[in-house]
Amino acid sequence: MLIRVDQEVWTEQCTRIEDFRSVWEDIVQHLSRQQKVIHYVEAGSEVLYEHYLEYIDHHFESISSVHVRTMPEETLLTESLAELRAYNRKLLDACDSIGSLFYGEMTSENWEYFQSLLNGLRWVFEAVVGTSGLMQKQGFQTPVAAKLHEVFQQLAQQIGDMENQLNDGQLVSVGDIIKYEITDTLKLLDEHLAHTEVNR
């Protein structure tokens, strides 16, 4: 198997999955030292943006080449912040209307809207954790860096409170949490993200 990292041939002698795993560890350590991350991986004819190792493990015998494409960590952070802000704004738009659904009869369609909102909140929660970790690792000094942990804590508490109220059948309380508490936290996050510049 031929393995390349960007324009560099890493090895042409990788015939066992055990060898590949060792080479992969070397690549990951090298990228960390270079302050780079994997953008995507071309494994044979497949382009993978996640779960690369699982795919390669499963298809190792049929893959003739692996090409790792990288990007600087700073670029990833900038793109992640922009994506987080855009998605957060969509959730903000949805919170008021979905929260209001809990003041009336909840239909199966309404529950689907709520589930979509919950999935979105979990995505924002995970994105805040990931972005905060990357900022800390890179030592970036930004207005949002100091505030992300506060948002993380508030969202964790509010999602937990909402799930407890759901379990107790307190649907009006769920609506209140969505319309007022979660909305305020997402607004706070948007304000922080609006003033973010990636500067060391």
Image (tube, rainbow, N blue to C red):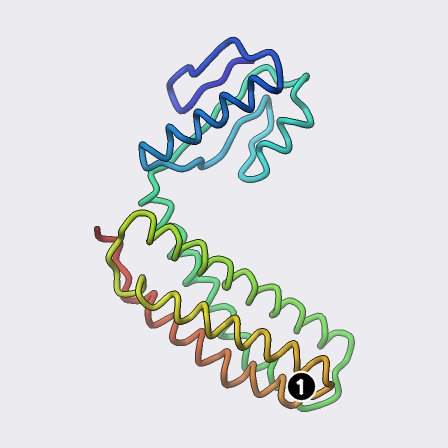
Pointer 1 residue: 102
The residue lying toward the viewer, choosing from 114 and 200, is 200
**Circle 1: element type:** loop
What residue type is disc 1 on? Phe
Q: Residue furthest top?
A: 13
Q: Residue at x 57, y 74 (%)?
A: 159
Q: Is 106 or 16 nearer to us in this picture?
A: 16
For the point 51% across and 58% down, the residue is 126
Residue at 60% x, 11% y: name it: 15
Query: In this rendering, is residue 11 above or below 69?
Result: above
- Can you tell which quarter of the image residue 118 is in? bottom right
Quarter that holds the N terminus: top right
**Image-quadrant location for residue 112:** bottom right
Q: Position of residue 50 (x, y in %)?
A: 56, 40
Query: x, y (%) of residue 100?
Result: 61, 86
Q: Which is more toward the observer, 147 or 105? A: 147
Q: Residues within 10 Å of mark 1 (few under 14, many from 20)?
A: many
- x and y, in percent, of residue 99 in the image: 60, 82
Look at the picture and state if 113 lies above or below 81: below
Q: Is residue 74 left or right of residue 54?
A: left
Q: Residue furthest left?
A: 200
Residue 120 sits in quarter: bottom right
- Find residue 81 and report its horizontal and vertical position in percent: 38, 56
Judge whether 106 appears above or below 7 on screen.
below
Q: Is residue 140 visible?
A: yes
Residue in the picture at 52% in, 71% down = 156
